[in-house]
Image (cartoon, helix red, strand yellow):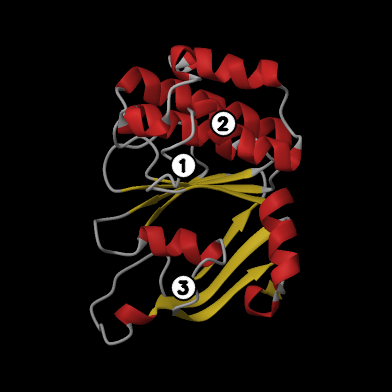
């Protein structure tokens, strides 16, 4: 996948509003592979909805979203499985980890499906993010900030042309936020991938090619 296009997209919940001022909603916007984007937003303006629309998780919007000129409304279920396995990764704001499984088990669920990352690299990321001692701790016993770091590692355990990163550092200190940004940037560069980050406040400090205001 080389490009994601949004054409006059608007969440249904905003359909009656006449006061919208947005760089995204009701605009023609393109995200290109290999570029890094930031979408800044106030709470309640639809940043998580935007990620869910692109990921094909929700379709409560008007307008069109296209992957390489193919409208995603025409994509079959089987094709979506392949897209999410090979082309599109996501770090959800609510993380969607399994609390009854350990940190490493949560990562392994993804990595065993894709066979993409070596255990050595995964352990290196755990070490860099200061959670190497949490590999065998159940997610439900970890802080939200620790869980965010695990969720990033899991999101990187697949090939992707684009990665969507929704509010990834809300519970991280500056040091871990910087490390997360470095890991994300390095892996995206290695894969030649596009990165789309959303933020309502603190953000990963990386070099953004373009910043949008939602």
Residue 205 in view of the camera:
no
Quadrant housing the N terminus: bottom right
The reply, left or right, for residue 40 in relation to residue 33 is: left
Q: Are marks 1 and 2 in contact (CB under 8 Å)?
A: yes
Could you tell me which residue is drawn at 24 percent across and 57 percent down?
Answer: 43
> Quick one: label 2, few (<14), some, or many (20+) residues within 10 Å?
some
Location of residue 31 with respect to 24 vertically, above or below: above
How dense is the environment of label 3, judged by Cα within 10 Å: few (below 14), some, or many (20 and up)? some
Using residue 61 as the reference point, say whether residue 45 is left or right of it: left
Residue of label 2:
105
Tell me the SS state at disc 2.
Answer: helix
Element carrying mark 1: loop
Q: CA distance from mark 1 to mark 3?
A: 37 Å
State the image coordinates of residue 140 (x, y, percent, origin top left): 36, 34
Measured as percent of width and height from the top left, residue 173 is found at: 29, 23
Q: Dividing the image into 4 quarters, which one contains the C terminus? A: bottom left
Asked whether, in this view, residue 102 is left or right of residue 56, the answer is left
Circle 1 is placed at which residue position?
98
Secondary structure at badge 3 equals: loop
Mark 3 = which residue? 27
């Amino acid at each position: 996948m080389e490009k994601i296009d949004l054409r006059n997209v608007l969440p249904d919940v905003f359909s009656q509003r006449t006061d919208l001022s947005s760089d995204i909603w009701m605009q023609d916007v393109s995200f290109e592979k290999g570029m890094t984007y930031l979408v800044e937003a106030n709470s309640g303006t639809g940043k998580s909805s935007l990620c869910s629309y692109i990921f094909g998780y929700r379709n409560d919007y008007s307008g069109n979203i296209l992957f390489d000129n193919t409208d995603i409304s025409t994509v079959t279920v089987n094709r979506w499985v392949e897209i999410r396995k090979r082309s599109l990764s996501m770090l959800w704001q609510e993380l969607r980890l399994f609390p009854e499984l350990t940190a490493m088990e949560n990562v392994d669920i993804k990595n065993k499906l894709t066979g993409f990352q070596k255990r050595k690299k995964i352990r290196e990321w755990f070490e860099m993010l200061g959670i190497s001692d949490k590999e065998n701790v159940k997610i439900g016993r970890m802080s939200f900030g620790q869980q965010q770091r695990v969720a990033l590692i899991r999101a990187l355990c697949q090939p992707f042309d684009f990665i969507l990163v929704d509010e990834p550092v809300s519970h991280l200190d500056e040091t871990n936020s910087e490390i997360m940004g470095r890991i994300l940037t390095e892996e995206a560069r290695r894969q030649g991938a596009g990165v789309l980050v959303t933020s309502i406040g603190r953000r990963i400090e990386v070099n953004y090619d373009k910043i949008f205001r939602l």
